Image (cartoon, rainbow, N blue to C red):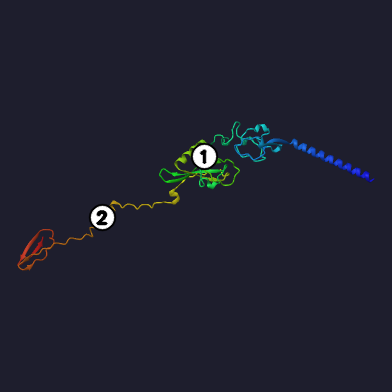
Amino acid sequence: MKSKRALIMIATSVLAGLLAVWLATRWIGQLAENTTKIVVASRDVDPGTVLGEGSLQVIAWPSGSVPSGAIKDLKKTQGRVASTQIFTGEPILEAKLAREGATGGLSSVLAEGKRAISIQANEIVGVAGYIRPGSRVDIMVNTHDSKDQTLSKIVLENILVLATAQDDKRDQTKPKVVSTVTLEVDPRQAEMIDLARSIGTLSMALRNSLDTAAVKTVGVTRNDLMGTLEAPAAPAPSSAASSAAQTPNAASAPKPKAKTASKKASGAVTPTASAAPAGEQVEIIRGVQKANSNF
């Protein structure tokens, strides 16, 4: 009786196991039917790297979430060049590869219509070494304006840094002071940088890579920085005031003393002669005295 019950339990367990295997197989088969094989990176890939079998692998990816432009055939990626950073497990997209025929290196990383130009850098120009490949910077020039005033102005904004010195890896965050910085610009911007570095000193301002807003400035001169440097000159005195200052006042000029004349006649003193009155005069002599009469 006990052996019969044991056989029934064993048979039931076997049937349950077989059912579980069948259900699991069916579930796996359904999953396989809903997936698509795509090519992904098997390790981190730097920009300008030529892709090969050692950096790629094919895996099953859910069909409903396959990224647009994903490459499904491993052969189509052989010899292609990565134009941007690709991380381990990330799908290989056509948009992240340089055009077919690219030979690798920095030239393959340049976007269509762009150019690479390098400028000298030091600890100050390179923002203490915090400018790294992939950073975004504004370019400033310190020069003199048409009035020979010292001028500092931002001439280019939101410029991509391709490399610092000979390093183009974008996964490094440790500051590093370098002697040159290579920038991605269009032909017009390349001309502006070439002219700016010949007429003044270039420097860079690091900006947030998500901040793409353009900010137009007129630049800052020495007067703007320090305020008005020279006090306004005092107005020159007018010619009339100058003449008045040099010519003494007629009212204050000393008056000449009146000349007096005296006559002695017969021992008598003749009175001081005053200014003759206007009009006709008649002279009258009375004894030893003389008097004038007017008509």
Closest to the observer, 277 or 249: 249
The quarter in which the N terminus is drawn is: top right
In the image, 182: left or right of 7? left
Closest to the observer, 232 or 202: 202
In this view, 81 is above or below 6? above
Residue at disc 2, secondary structure: helix
Q: Earlier in the sequence, mark 2 or mark 1?
A: 1
Mark 2, residue position: 246
Residue at (28% x, 52% y) in the render: 240
Label 1 sits on what residue type?
A: Ser
Closest to the observer, 281 or 176: 176
| Residue 295 lies in quadrant | bottom left
Numbered disc in front, either 2 or 1: 1
Residue at (81% x, 39% y) in the render: 23
In the image, 41: left or right of 167? right
Residue at (5% x, 65% y) in the render: 285
Residue 245 visible, this angle: yes
| Residue 76 lies in quadrant | top right
Closest to the observer, 69 or 122: 122
Q: How far is disc 2 from disc 1 in space, using C-alphas? A: 69 Å
> Dot 2, how many residues are within 10 Å of its Cα: few (below 14), some (14-19), or many (20+)?
few
Label 2 sits on what residue type?
A: Gln
Residue contact between numbered discs 2 and 1, judged by CB atoms under 8 Å = no
Where does residue 71 sit, x and y in percent of width and height?
Answer: 66, 34
Which residue extends farthest bottom?
267
Where does residue 177 sit, x and y in percent of width and height?
Answer: 54, 46
Mark 1, residue position: 118
Where does residue 3 sit, x and y in percent of width and height?
Answer: 93, 44
Residue at (8% x, 61% y) in the render: 282
Residue at disc 1, secondary structure: strand
> Dot 1, how many residues are within 10 Å of its Cα: few (below 14), some (14-19), or many (20+)?
some
